[in-house]
Image (cartoon, coloured by chain):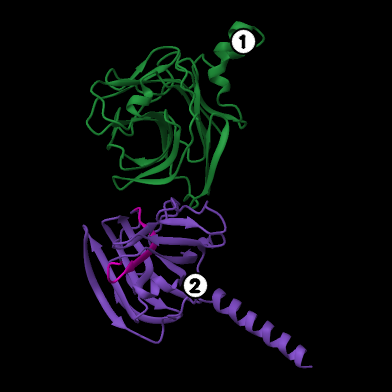
Amino acid sequence: MRLLFGIFALLFFLAAQTSQAAWACEGQDGKAVLDDKFADDAGGWLFDNRVLSLAAPGARIYLQAGAGAAIILNRTFDMNAGDFCVETSYTSEALKVNAGFGVIFWAKDLKDLWSAAAFPTGDVMLSHLNEGNWQTVWKTTVPSLFKSSAGATNAMRVIAKDETITVDLNGTTIKSVRAKQPPADATLYFGVYVGPTRKTSTPFSVNLHSFTAME
Amino acid sequence: MRAALTFGPDFPGGTTVAERGYAPVLPRLCLGAALCCLSVAPASACDGQSGPILMTDSFWNTQGGWSFDERNFVLEAPGAIIKLPNQKGGSSLGVLYLTKSFDEGDFCVTGTFSAESLKVGAGFGVLFWAKDQDNFWVAAAYADGQVDLARYSNKNWLPVWVTKEKGLANLDPNAVNAVRVIARRDSLTVIFNGRALKTIRTRPLAAFPSYRFGIFAASLKPTSTAFTINIHSYDVTE
């Protein structure tokens, strides 16, 4: 009886874990343009082993000692208006340096883009890199939302459409702001952001589990 | 990194000219004769293209739908020469086909690496999904064995995939190298000298944007003199 109960408890635990991972980007209900769980390297990301390596299923983003941030753009699924969601989990080193992670969107190039990022300390911010200069659009602190233990999955979602940018962390909407939608015919990219708030003397990595982009 | 691409001739443009020259007929007539088989080699370098022919040109004349230009793209039948200017940071050139556009297709260009190719980092390939001068895709092979797929987007180069393998390019001045791209609605496959190197998923194309295609050539290293690349054929099949 006790053994049976143990098996049920284990199954329940596994189901809960699976469910948690599967529903981290809960709410995305459009048409999927990209749904990449990094089972292979054909999803349009540039793998080079210094910044991004495939660790199927999943990938790993590396930051070298002293690096500012990694901005990784998908190169083949450009998209203008969309609903973007990235799932990551942290190593203990990434937690130590308070590395932020998030979604890059409306990226014209590496000097002109938007970023929504969350940090282990609970900070969440929306920023605009404009001609190479970072501008903070808004910043807030929600300490209870970020799962700040090594291996826990966090999901950052950005809905950038209909003249509005909405940022959502682990299923909770943090903030919506009105914004000028880029022209429909503009070629704009999306991707992943990882960056520590302070420069580190040791390299670290962040696990990348999925990226979903929906119309 | 590549220098900015110069388009020559004007983009887009073109009027009606005969799309198909005499070239495809000649190799077929030669089949069976040992000597002629040598001249068949350039055409067969694009082995594997199986669909109906959309466009084919072995540059026997100027009627193939390209705009020849003394400065950049010169007919030297059978074949053509792309001239790259000498520039400090290397140079690149896109030559567009002017009389037809294809969004999907199996594009293949053949060419030869000259003896100086390694020194100047010479490469050539297929230019496709060209929306305008600032937005297009390129699959190219270089003399040092690098093969890559890249986007020129909003006036910036964005590498999509890169590989490098010693011996991948045939540097014999008489050998033909073939760069081929199969561009489908939602994927791209890069094939070099008959070997499929990579397939990548892409965002499905919107309804028939009428993208242009053409030839791409580059020298990645600085050269003190102008450099030429010999192009033998260009074929597009469905």
Residue A69 - label: none
Kind of element beneath mark 2:
loop
Pick the front one: B180 or B169:
B169
Task: Judge the density around disc 1: few (<14), some (14-19), many (≥20) Cα neighbours within 10 Å.
Answer: few
Residue A28 - label: 2
Residue drawn at x 33%, y 34% as measured from the top left: B12
A6 within the magenta span:
no
Residue drawn at x 28%, y 17% as measured from the top left: B70
* A59 sits to left or right of A174: right
- What residue occupies the far bottom of the structure in this picture? A1
Q: Residue A69 placed where, x, y %?
A: 31, 63
Q: Is residue A99 above or below residue B58?
A: below
Q: Mark 2 is on which residue type?
A: Gln
Q: Quadrant of residue B63?
A: top left
Name the subunit of mark 2.
Answer: A
- What residue occupies the far front of the structure in this picture? A201
Q: Residue B65 placed where, x, y %?
A: 41, 23
Colour seen for chain A? purple
Colour seen for chain B? green
Pick the front one: B14 or A93:
A93
Q: Residue A71 placed where, x, y %?
A: 35, 60
